[in-house]
Amino acid sequence: LKSCDVRGVFRGAFLDRQSSAATAMTGELFDLWKAGRIKPKISATYPLERAGEAIAALADRKAVGKLLVRMDA
């Protein structure tokens, strides 16, 4: 494919089949993020009480990148 860029992974089956490897990879991703080596696209942030709006945005395919739901204490 020309000019094709694929990002992201469906992790459901991977988590089921290789949970320890998936956990290790998640830790590596967080380390890369903390070091500033990767910067995920975050299109919106919602407080917990508006989580339903975040789910609706996903369902309506309005999200570009990640949506965050904050659970502040």
Image (cartoon, helix red, strand yellow):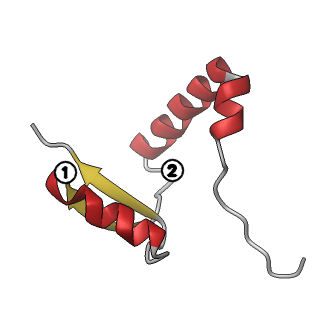
Q: How many numbered discs sit on the rendered protein?
A: 2
Q: Residues within 10 Å of mark 1 (few under 14, many from 20)?
A: some
Residue plotted at (64% across, 30% down):
15
Q: Is residue 18 above or below residue 55?
A: above
**Residue for badge 2:** 37
- Residue 48 bears which disc, if any? 1
Q: Is residue 20 above or below residue 26?
A: above
Quadrant, the C terminus? top left
Query: Residue 4, how many percent across, how many down?
Result: 79, 76
In the image, what residue type sits under mark 2? Answer: Arg
Image position of 19 (left or right of 42) = right
Q: Position of residue 7 (x, y in %)?
A: 66, 61
| Quadrant placement of the N terminus | bottom right
Find residue 53 and report its image quarter. bottom left
Classify residue 58 by image quadrant. Answer: bottom left
Element type at mark 1: helix
Direction left: furthest residue: 73
Q: Residue at x 28, y 53 (%)?
A: 69
Question: Pointer 2: residues within 10 angstroms few (<14), some, or many (20+)?
Answer: few
Residue 64: which numbered mark, if any? none
Residue positioned most to the top: 20
Residues at badges 1 and 2 in contact (C-beta under 8 Å)? no
First in sequence: mark 1 vs mark 2: 2
